[in-house]
Amino acid sequence: MATPVLDKADSAPEPGFADSPYITVTFRIRRFNPEISAEAFWDDFQVEIDPKERVLDALHKIKWELDGSLTFRRSCAHGICGSDAMRINGKNRLACKTLIKDINPAKPITVEAIKGLTVLKDLVVDMDPFFQAYRDVMPFLITKDTNEPTRERLQTAEDRERFDDTTKCILCAACTSSCPVFWNDGQYFGPAAIVNAHRFIFDSRDEAGEQRLEILNDRDGVWRCRTTFNCTDACPRGIEITKAIQEVKRALITRRY
Amino acid sequence: MATTETTASGIGPVEGASQYSVDNPAPLIEAPRQRTKKSPKSTRGNFEMAAWLFMRLSGVVLVVLVIGHLLIQLVLDGGVSKIGFAFVAGRWASPFWQVWDLLMLWLAMLHGANGLRTVINDYAERANTRLWLKGLLYTATVFTILLGTLVIFTFDPNIR
Ligand code: HEM
Ligand code: SF4
Ligand code: FES
């Protein structure tokens, strides 16, 4: 047996190749349809699926083959549009970036709408309060010169690096809807709005940092953050959100940014 | 498989027969937390920042005051059994310990009260519940601070 690899190839097919990769997974989905009942309920679906597929593939299979009334948002299916944040096994994730094999398919996998926002139907929530907070921090470049620029606004690599982390946000709301302070009354600006304010406050080309800091100095601004770190854990883009929030707090105290 | 058959409209039986119709519409879900006329206009100002800073600064000072206090009262010199009227009277004879206890009283009370204020803000859902809980909290805080201060300043070791 000097060459076990060759031997194996002769005798048996590659393990896991011939036998089906499909397993049966139970998806326990939180359903809600206000036209039928004011109560939400858990609905179980059994799906034959390759565990290397994603939760989004399972939701598609359910919607397309089992129950067409299952309602959820998705667009890009590749972790870039931010439409399919949901609470999977109690944790906020993107359904399109969560492999079934990574979340213990031996047990029923629970799928719910993200918390803290009104559920409209099944997994679809009303994102208006979330985007209201986003709009409130003025997430666009503001400069003092009134004239149209005649050339590109240049910036050093270090200046660009300063806010690189917070440019990665896809506005999926996984962070804000994982924050217990937001769950209570939804008035807190929330991590996502602060992340997107951070992106401009620390941009050397932007000149409205002072204004944005004032906005976040609100009663429901950065000071409501209790450093729970839920947002950092939830972010599918791996943004260091709690750190960004602390940097905004520090900028408010020292007025240096 | 949970549900496989579908109706003509493509709607699965999960939907069931609707209890609601055009004449009997489903209850409207109130859009929550929208910035309405009722939500307060300006909630800015530096109070929350000051409160946040105060929690960290008073915390640092409290580490020294509280641990020192616990050591003196409960650990050193025979521990808790030595505490009595005479022991307290002896310590309060010195202005140093008077100031220590006064500072500890004020800082701990304000720190604790502000901490509970954030807890109420984070957990009480209705405006009325908040109002009452905070009213209770502020009353208790003011009462304790005033009573404690009064005792420290008017303590009479010869009382009988
Ligand atoms: C021994 C030194 C102490 C230190 C270093 C300390 C530090 C802190 C800090 C930094 C916070 C803010 C937490 C946040 O904003 O998320 C806090 C919160 C709080 N502290 Fe203290 N503290 C101390 C003693 C005390 C004492 C003696 C009391 C009670 C009178 C107290 C009651 C509270 C309460 C009720 C909160 C709010 C809890 C929360 O926000 O979750 N602390 N403390
Ligand atoms: S910071 Fe992360 S979790 Fe929050 S909205 Fe942006 S991408 Fe989503
Ligand atoms: S569908 Fe676009 S992020 Fe998941």
Image (spheres, rainbow, N blue to C red):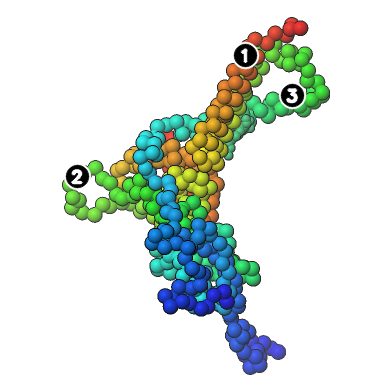
In this view of the protein, which residue sits in the foreground, A97 or B6? B6
Quadrant for the N terminus of chain B in the image: bottom right
Q: Give the residue type at disc 2.
A: Thr
Q: What chain is tagged by disc 3?
A: B
**Disc number lying in front (1 or 3):** 1
Q: Are marks 1 and 2 in contact (CB under 8 Å)?
A: no
**Mark 1 element type:** helix
- A172 left or right of B110 in image: left
Location of mark 3 (residue): B73
Residue B70 visible in the snapshot: yes
Q: Which residue sits at x=47%, y=57%? A: A119
Cα distance in 3D space between marks 1 and 3: 21 Å
- A195 left or right of B110 in image: left
Quadrant for the C terminus of chain B in the image: top right
Q: What chain is tagged by disc 1?
A: B
Which quarter of the figure has residue A171?
Answer: bottom left
Give the x, y percent position of residue A21. Answer: 58, 81
**Mark 2 element type:** loop
Count how many numbered circles sit on residues in the image: 3
- A215 left or right of B81 in image: left
For residue B142, above or below residue B38: above
For the residue carrying disc 1, how many other residues have a C-alpha within 10 Å: few (<14), some (14-19), or many (20+)?
few
Q: Give the residue type at disc 1.
A: Leu
Cα distance in 3D space between marks 1 and 2: 62 Å
The residue furthest front is B23
> Both on one chain, marks 1 and 3?
yes
Location of mark 1 (residue): B150
**Mark 3 element type:** helix
Location of mark 2 (residue): A146
Which sits earlier in the primary sequence, circle 1 or circle 3? Answer: 3
Q: Which residue sits at x=56%, y=33%? A: B133
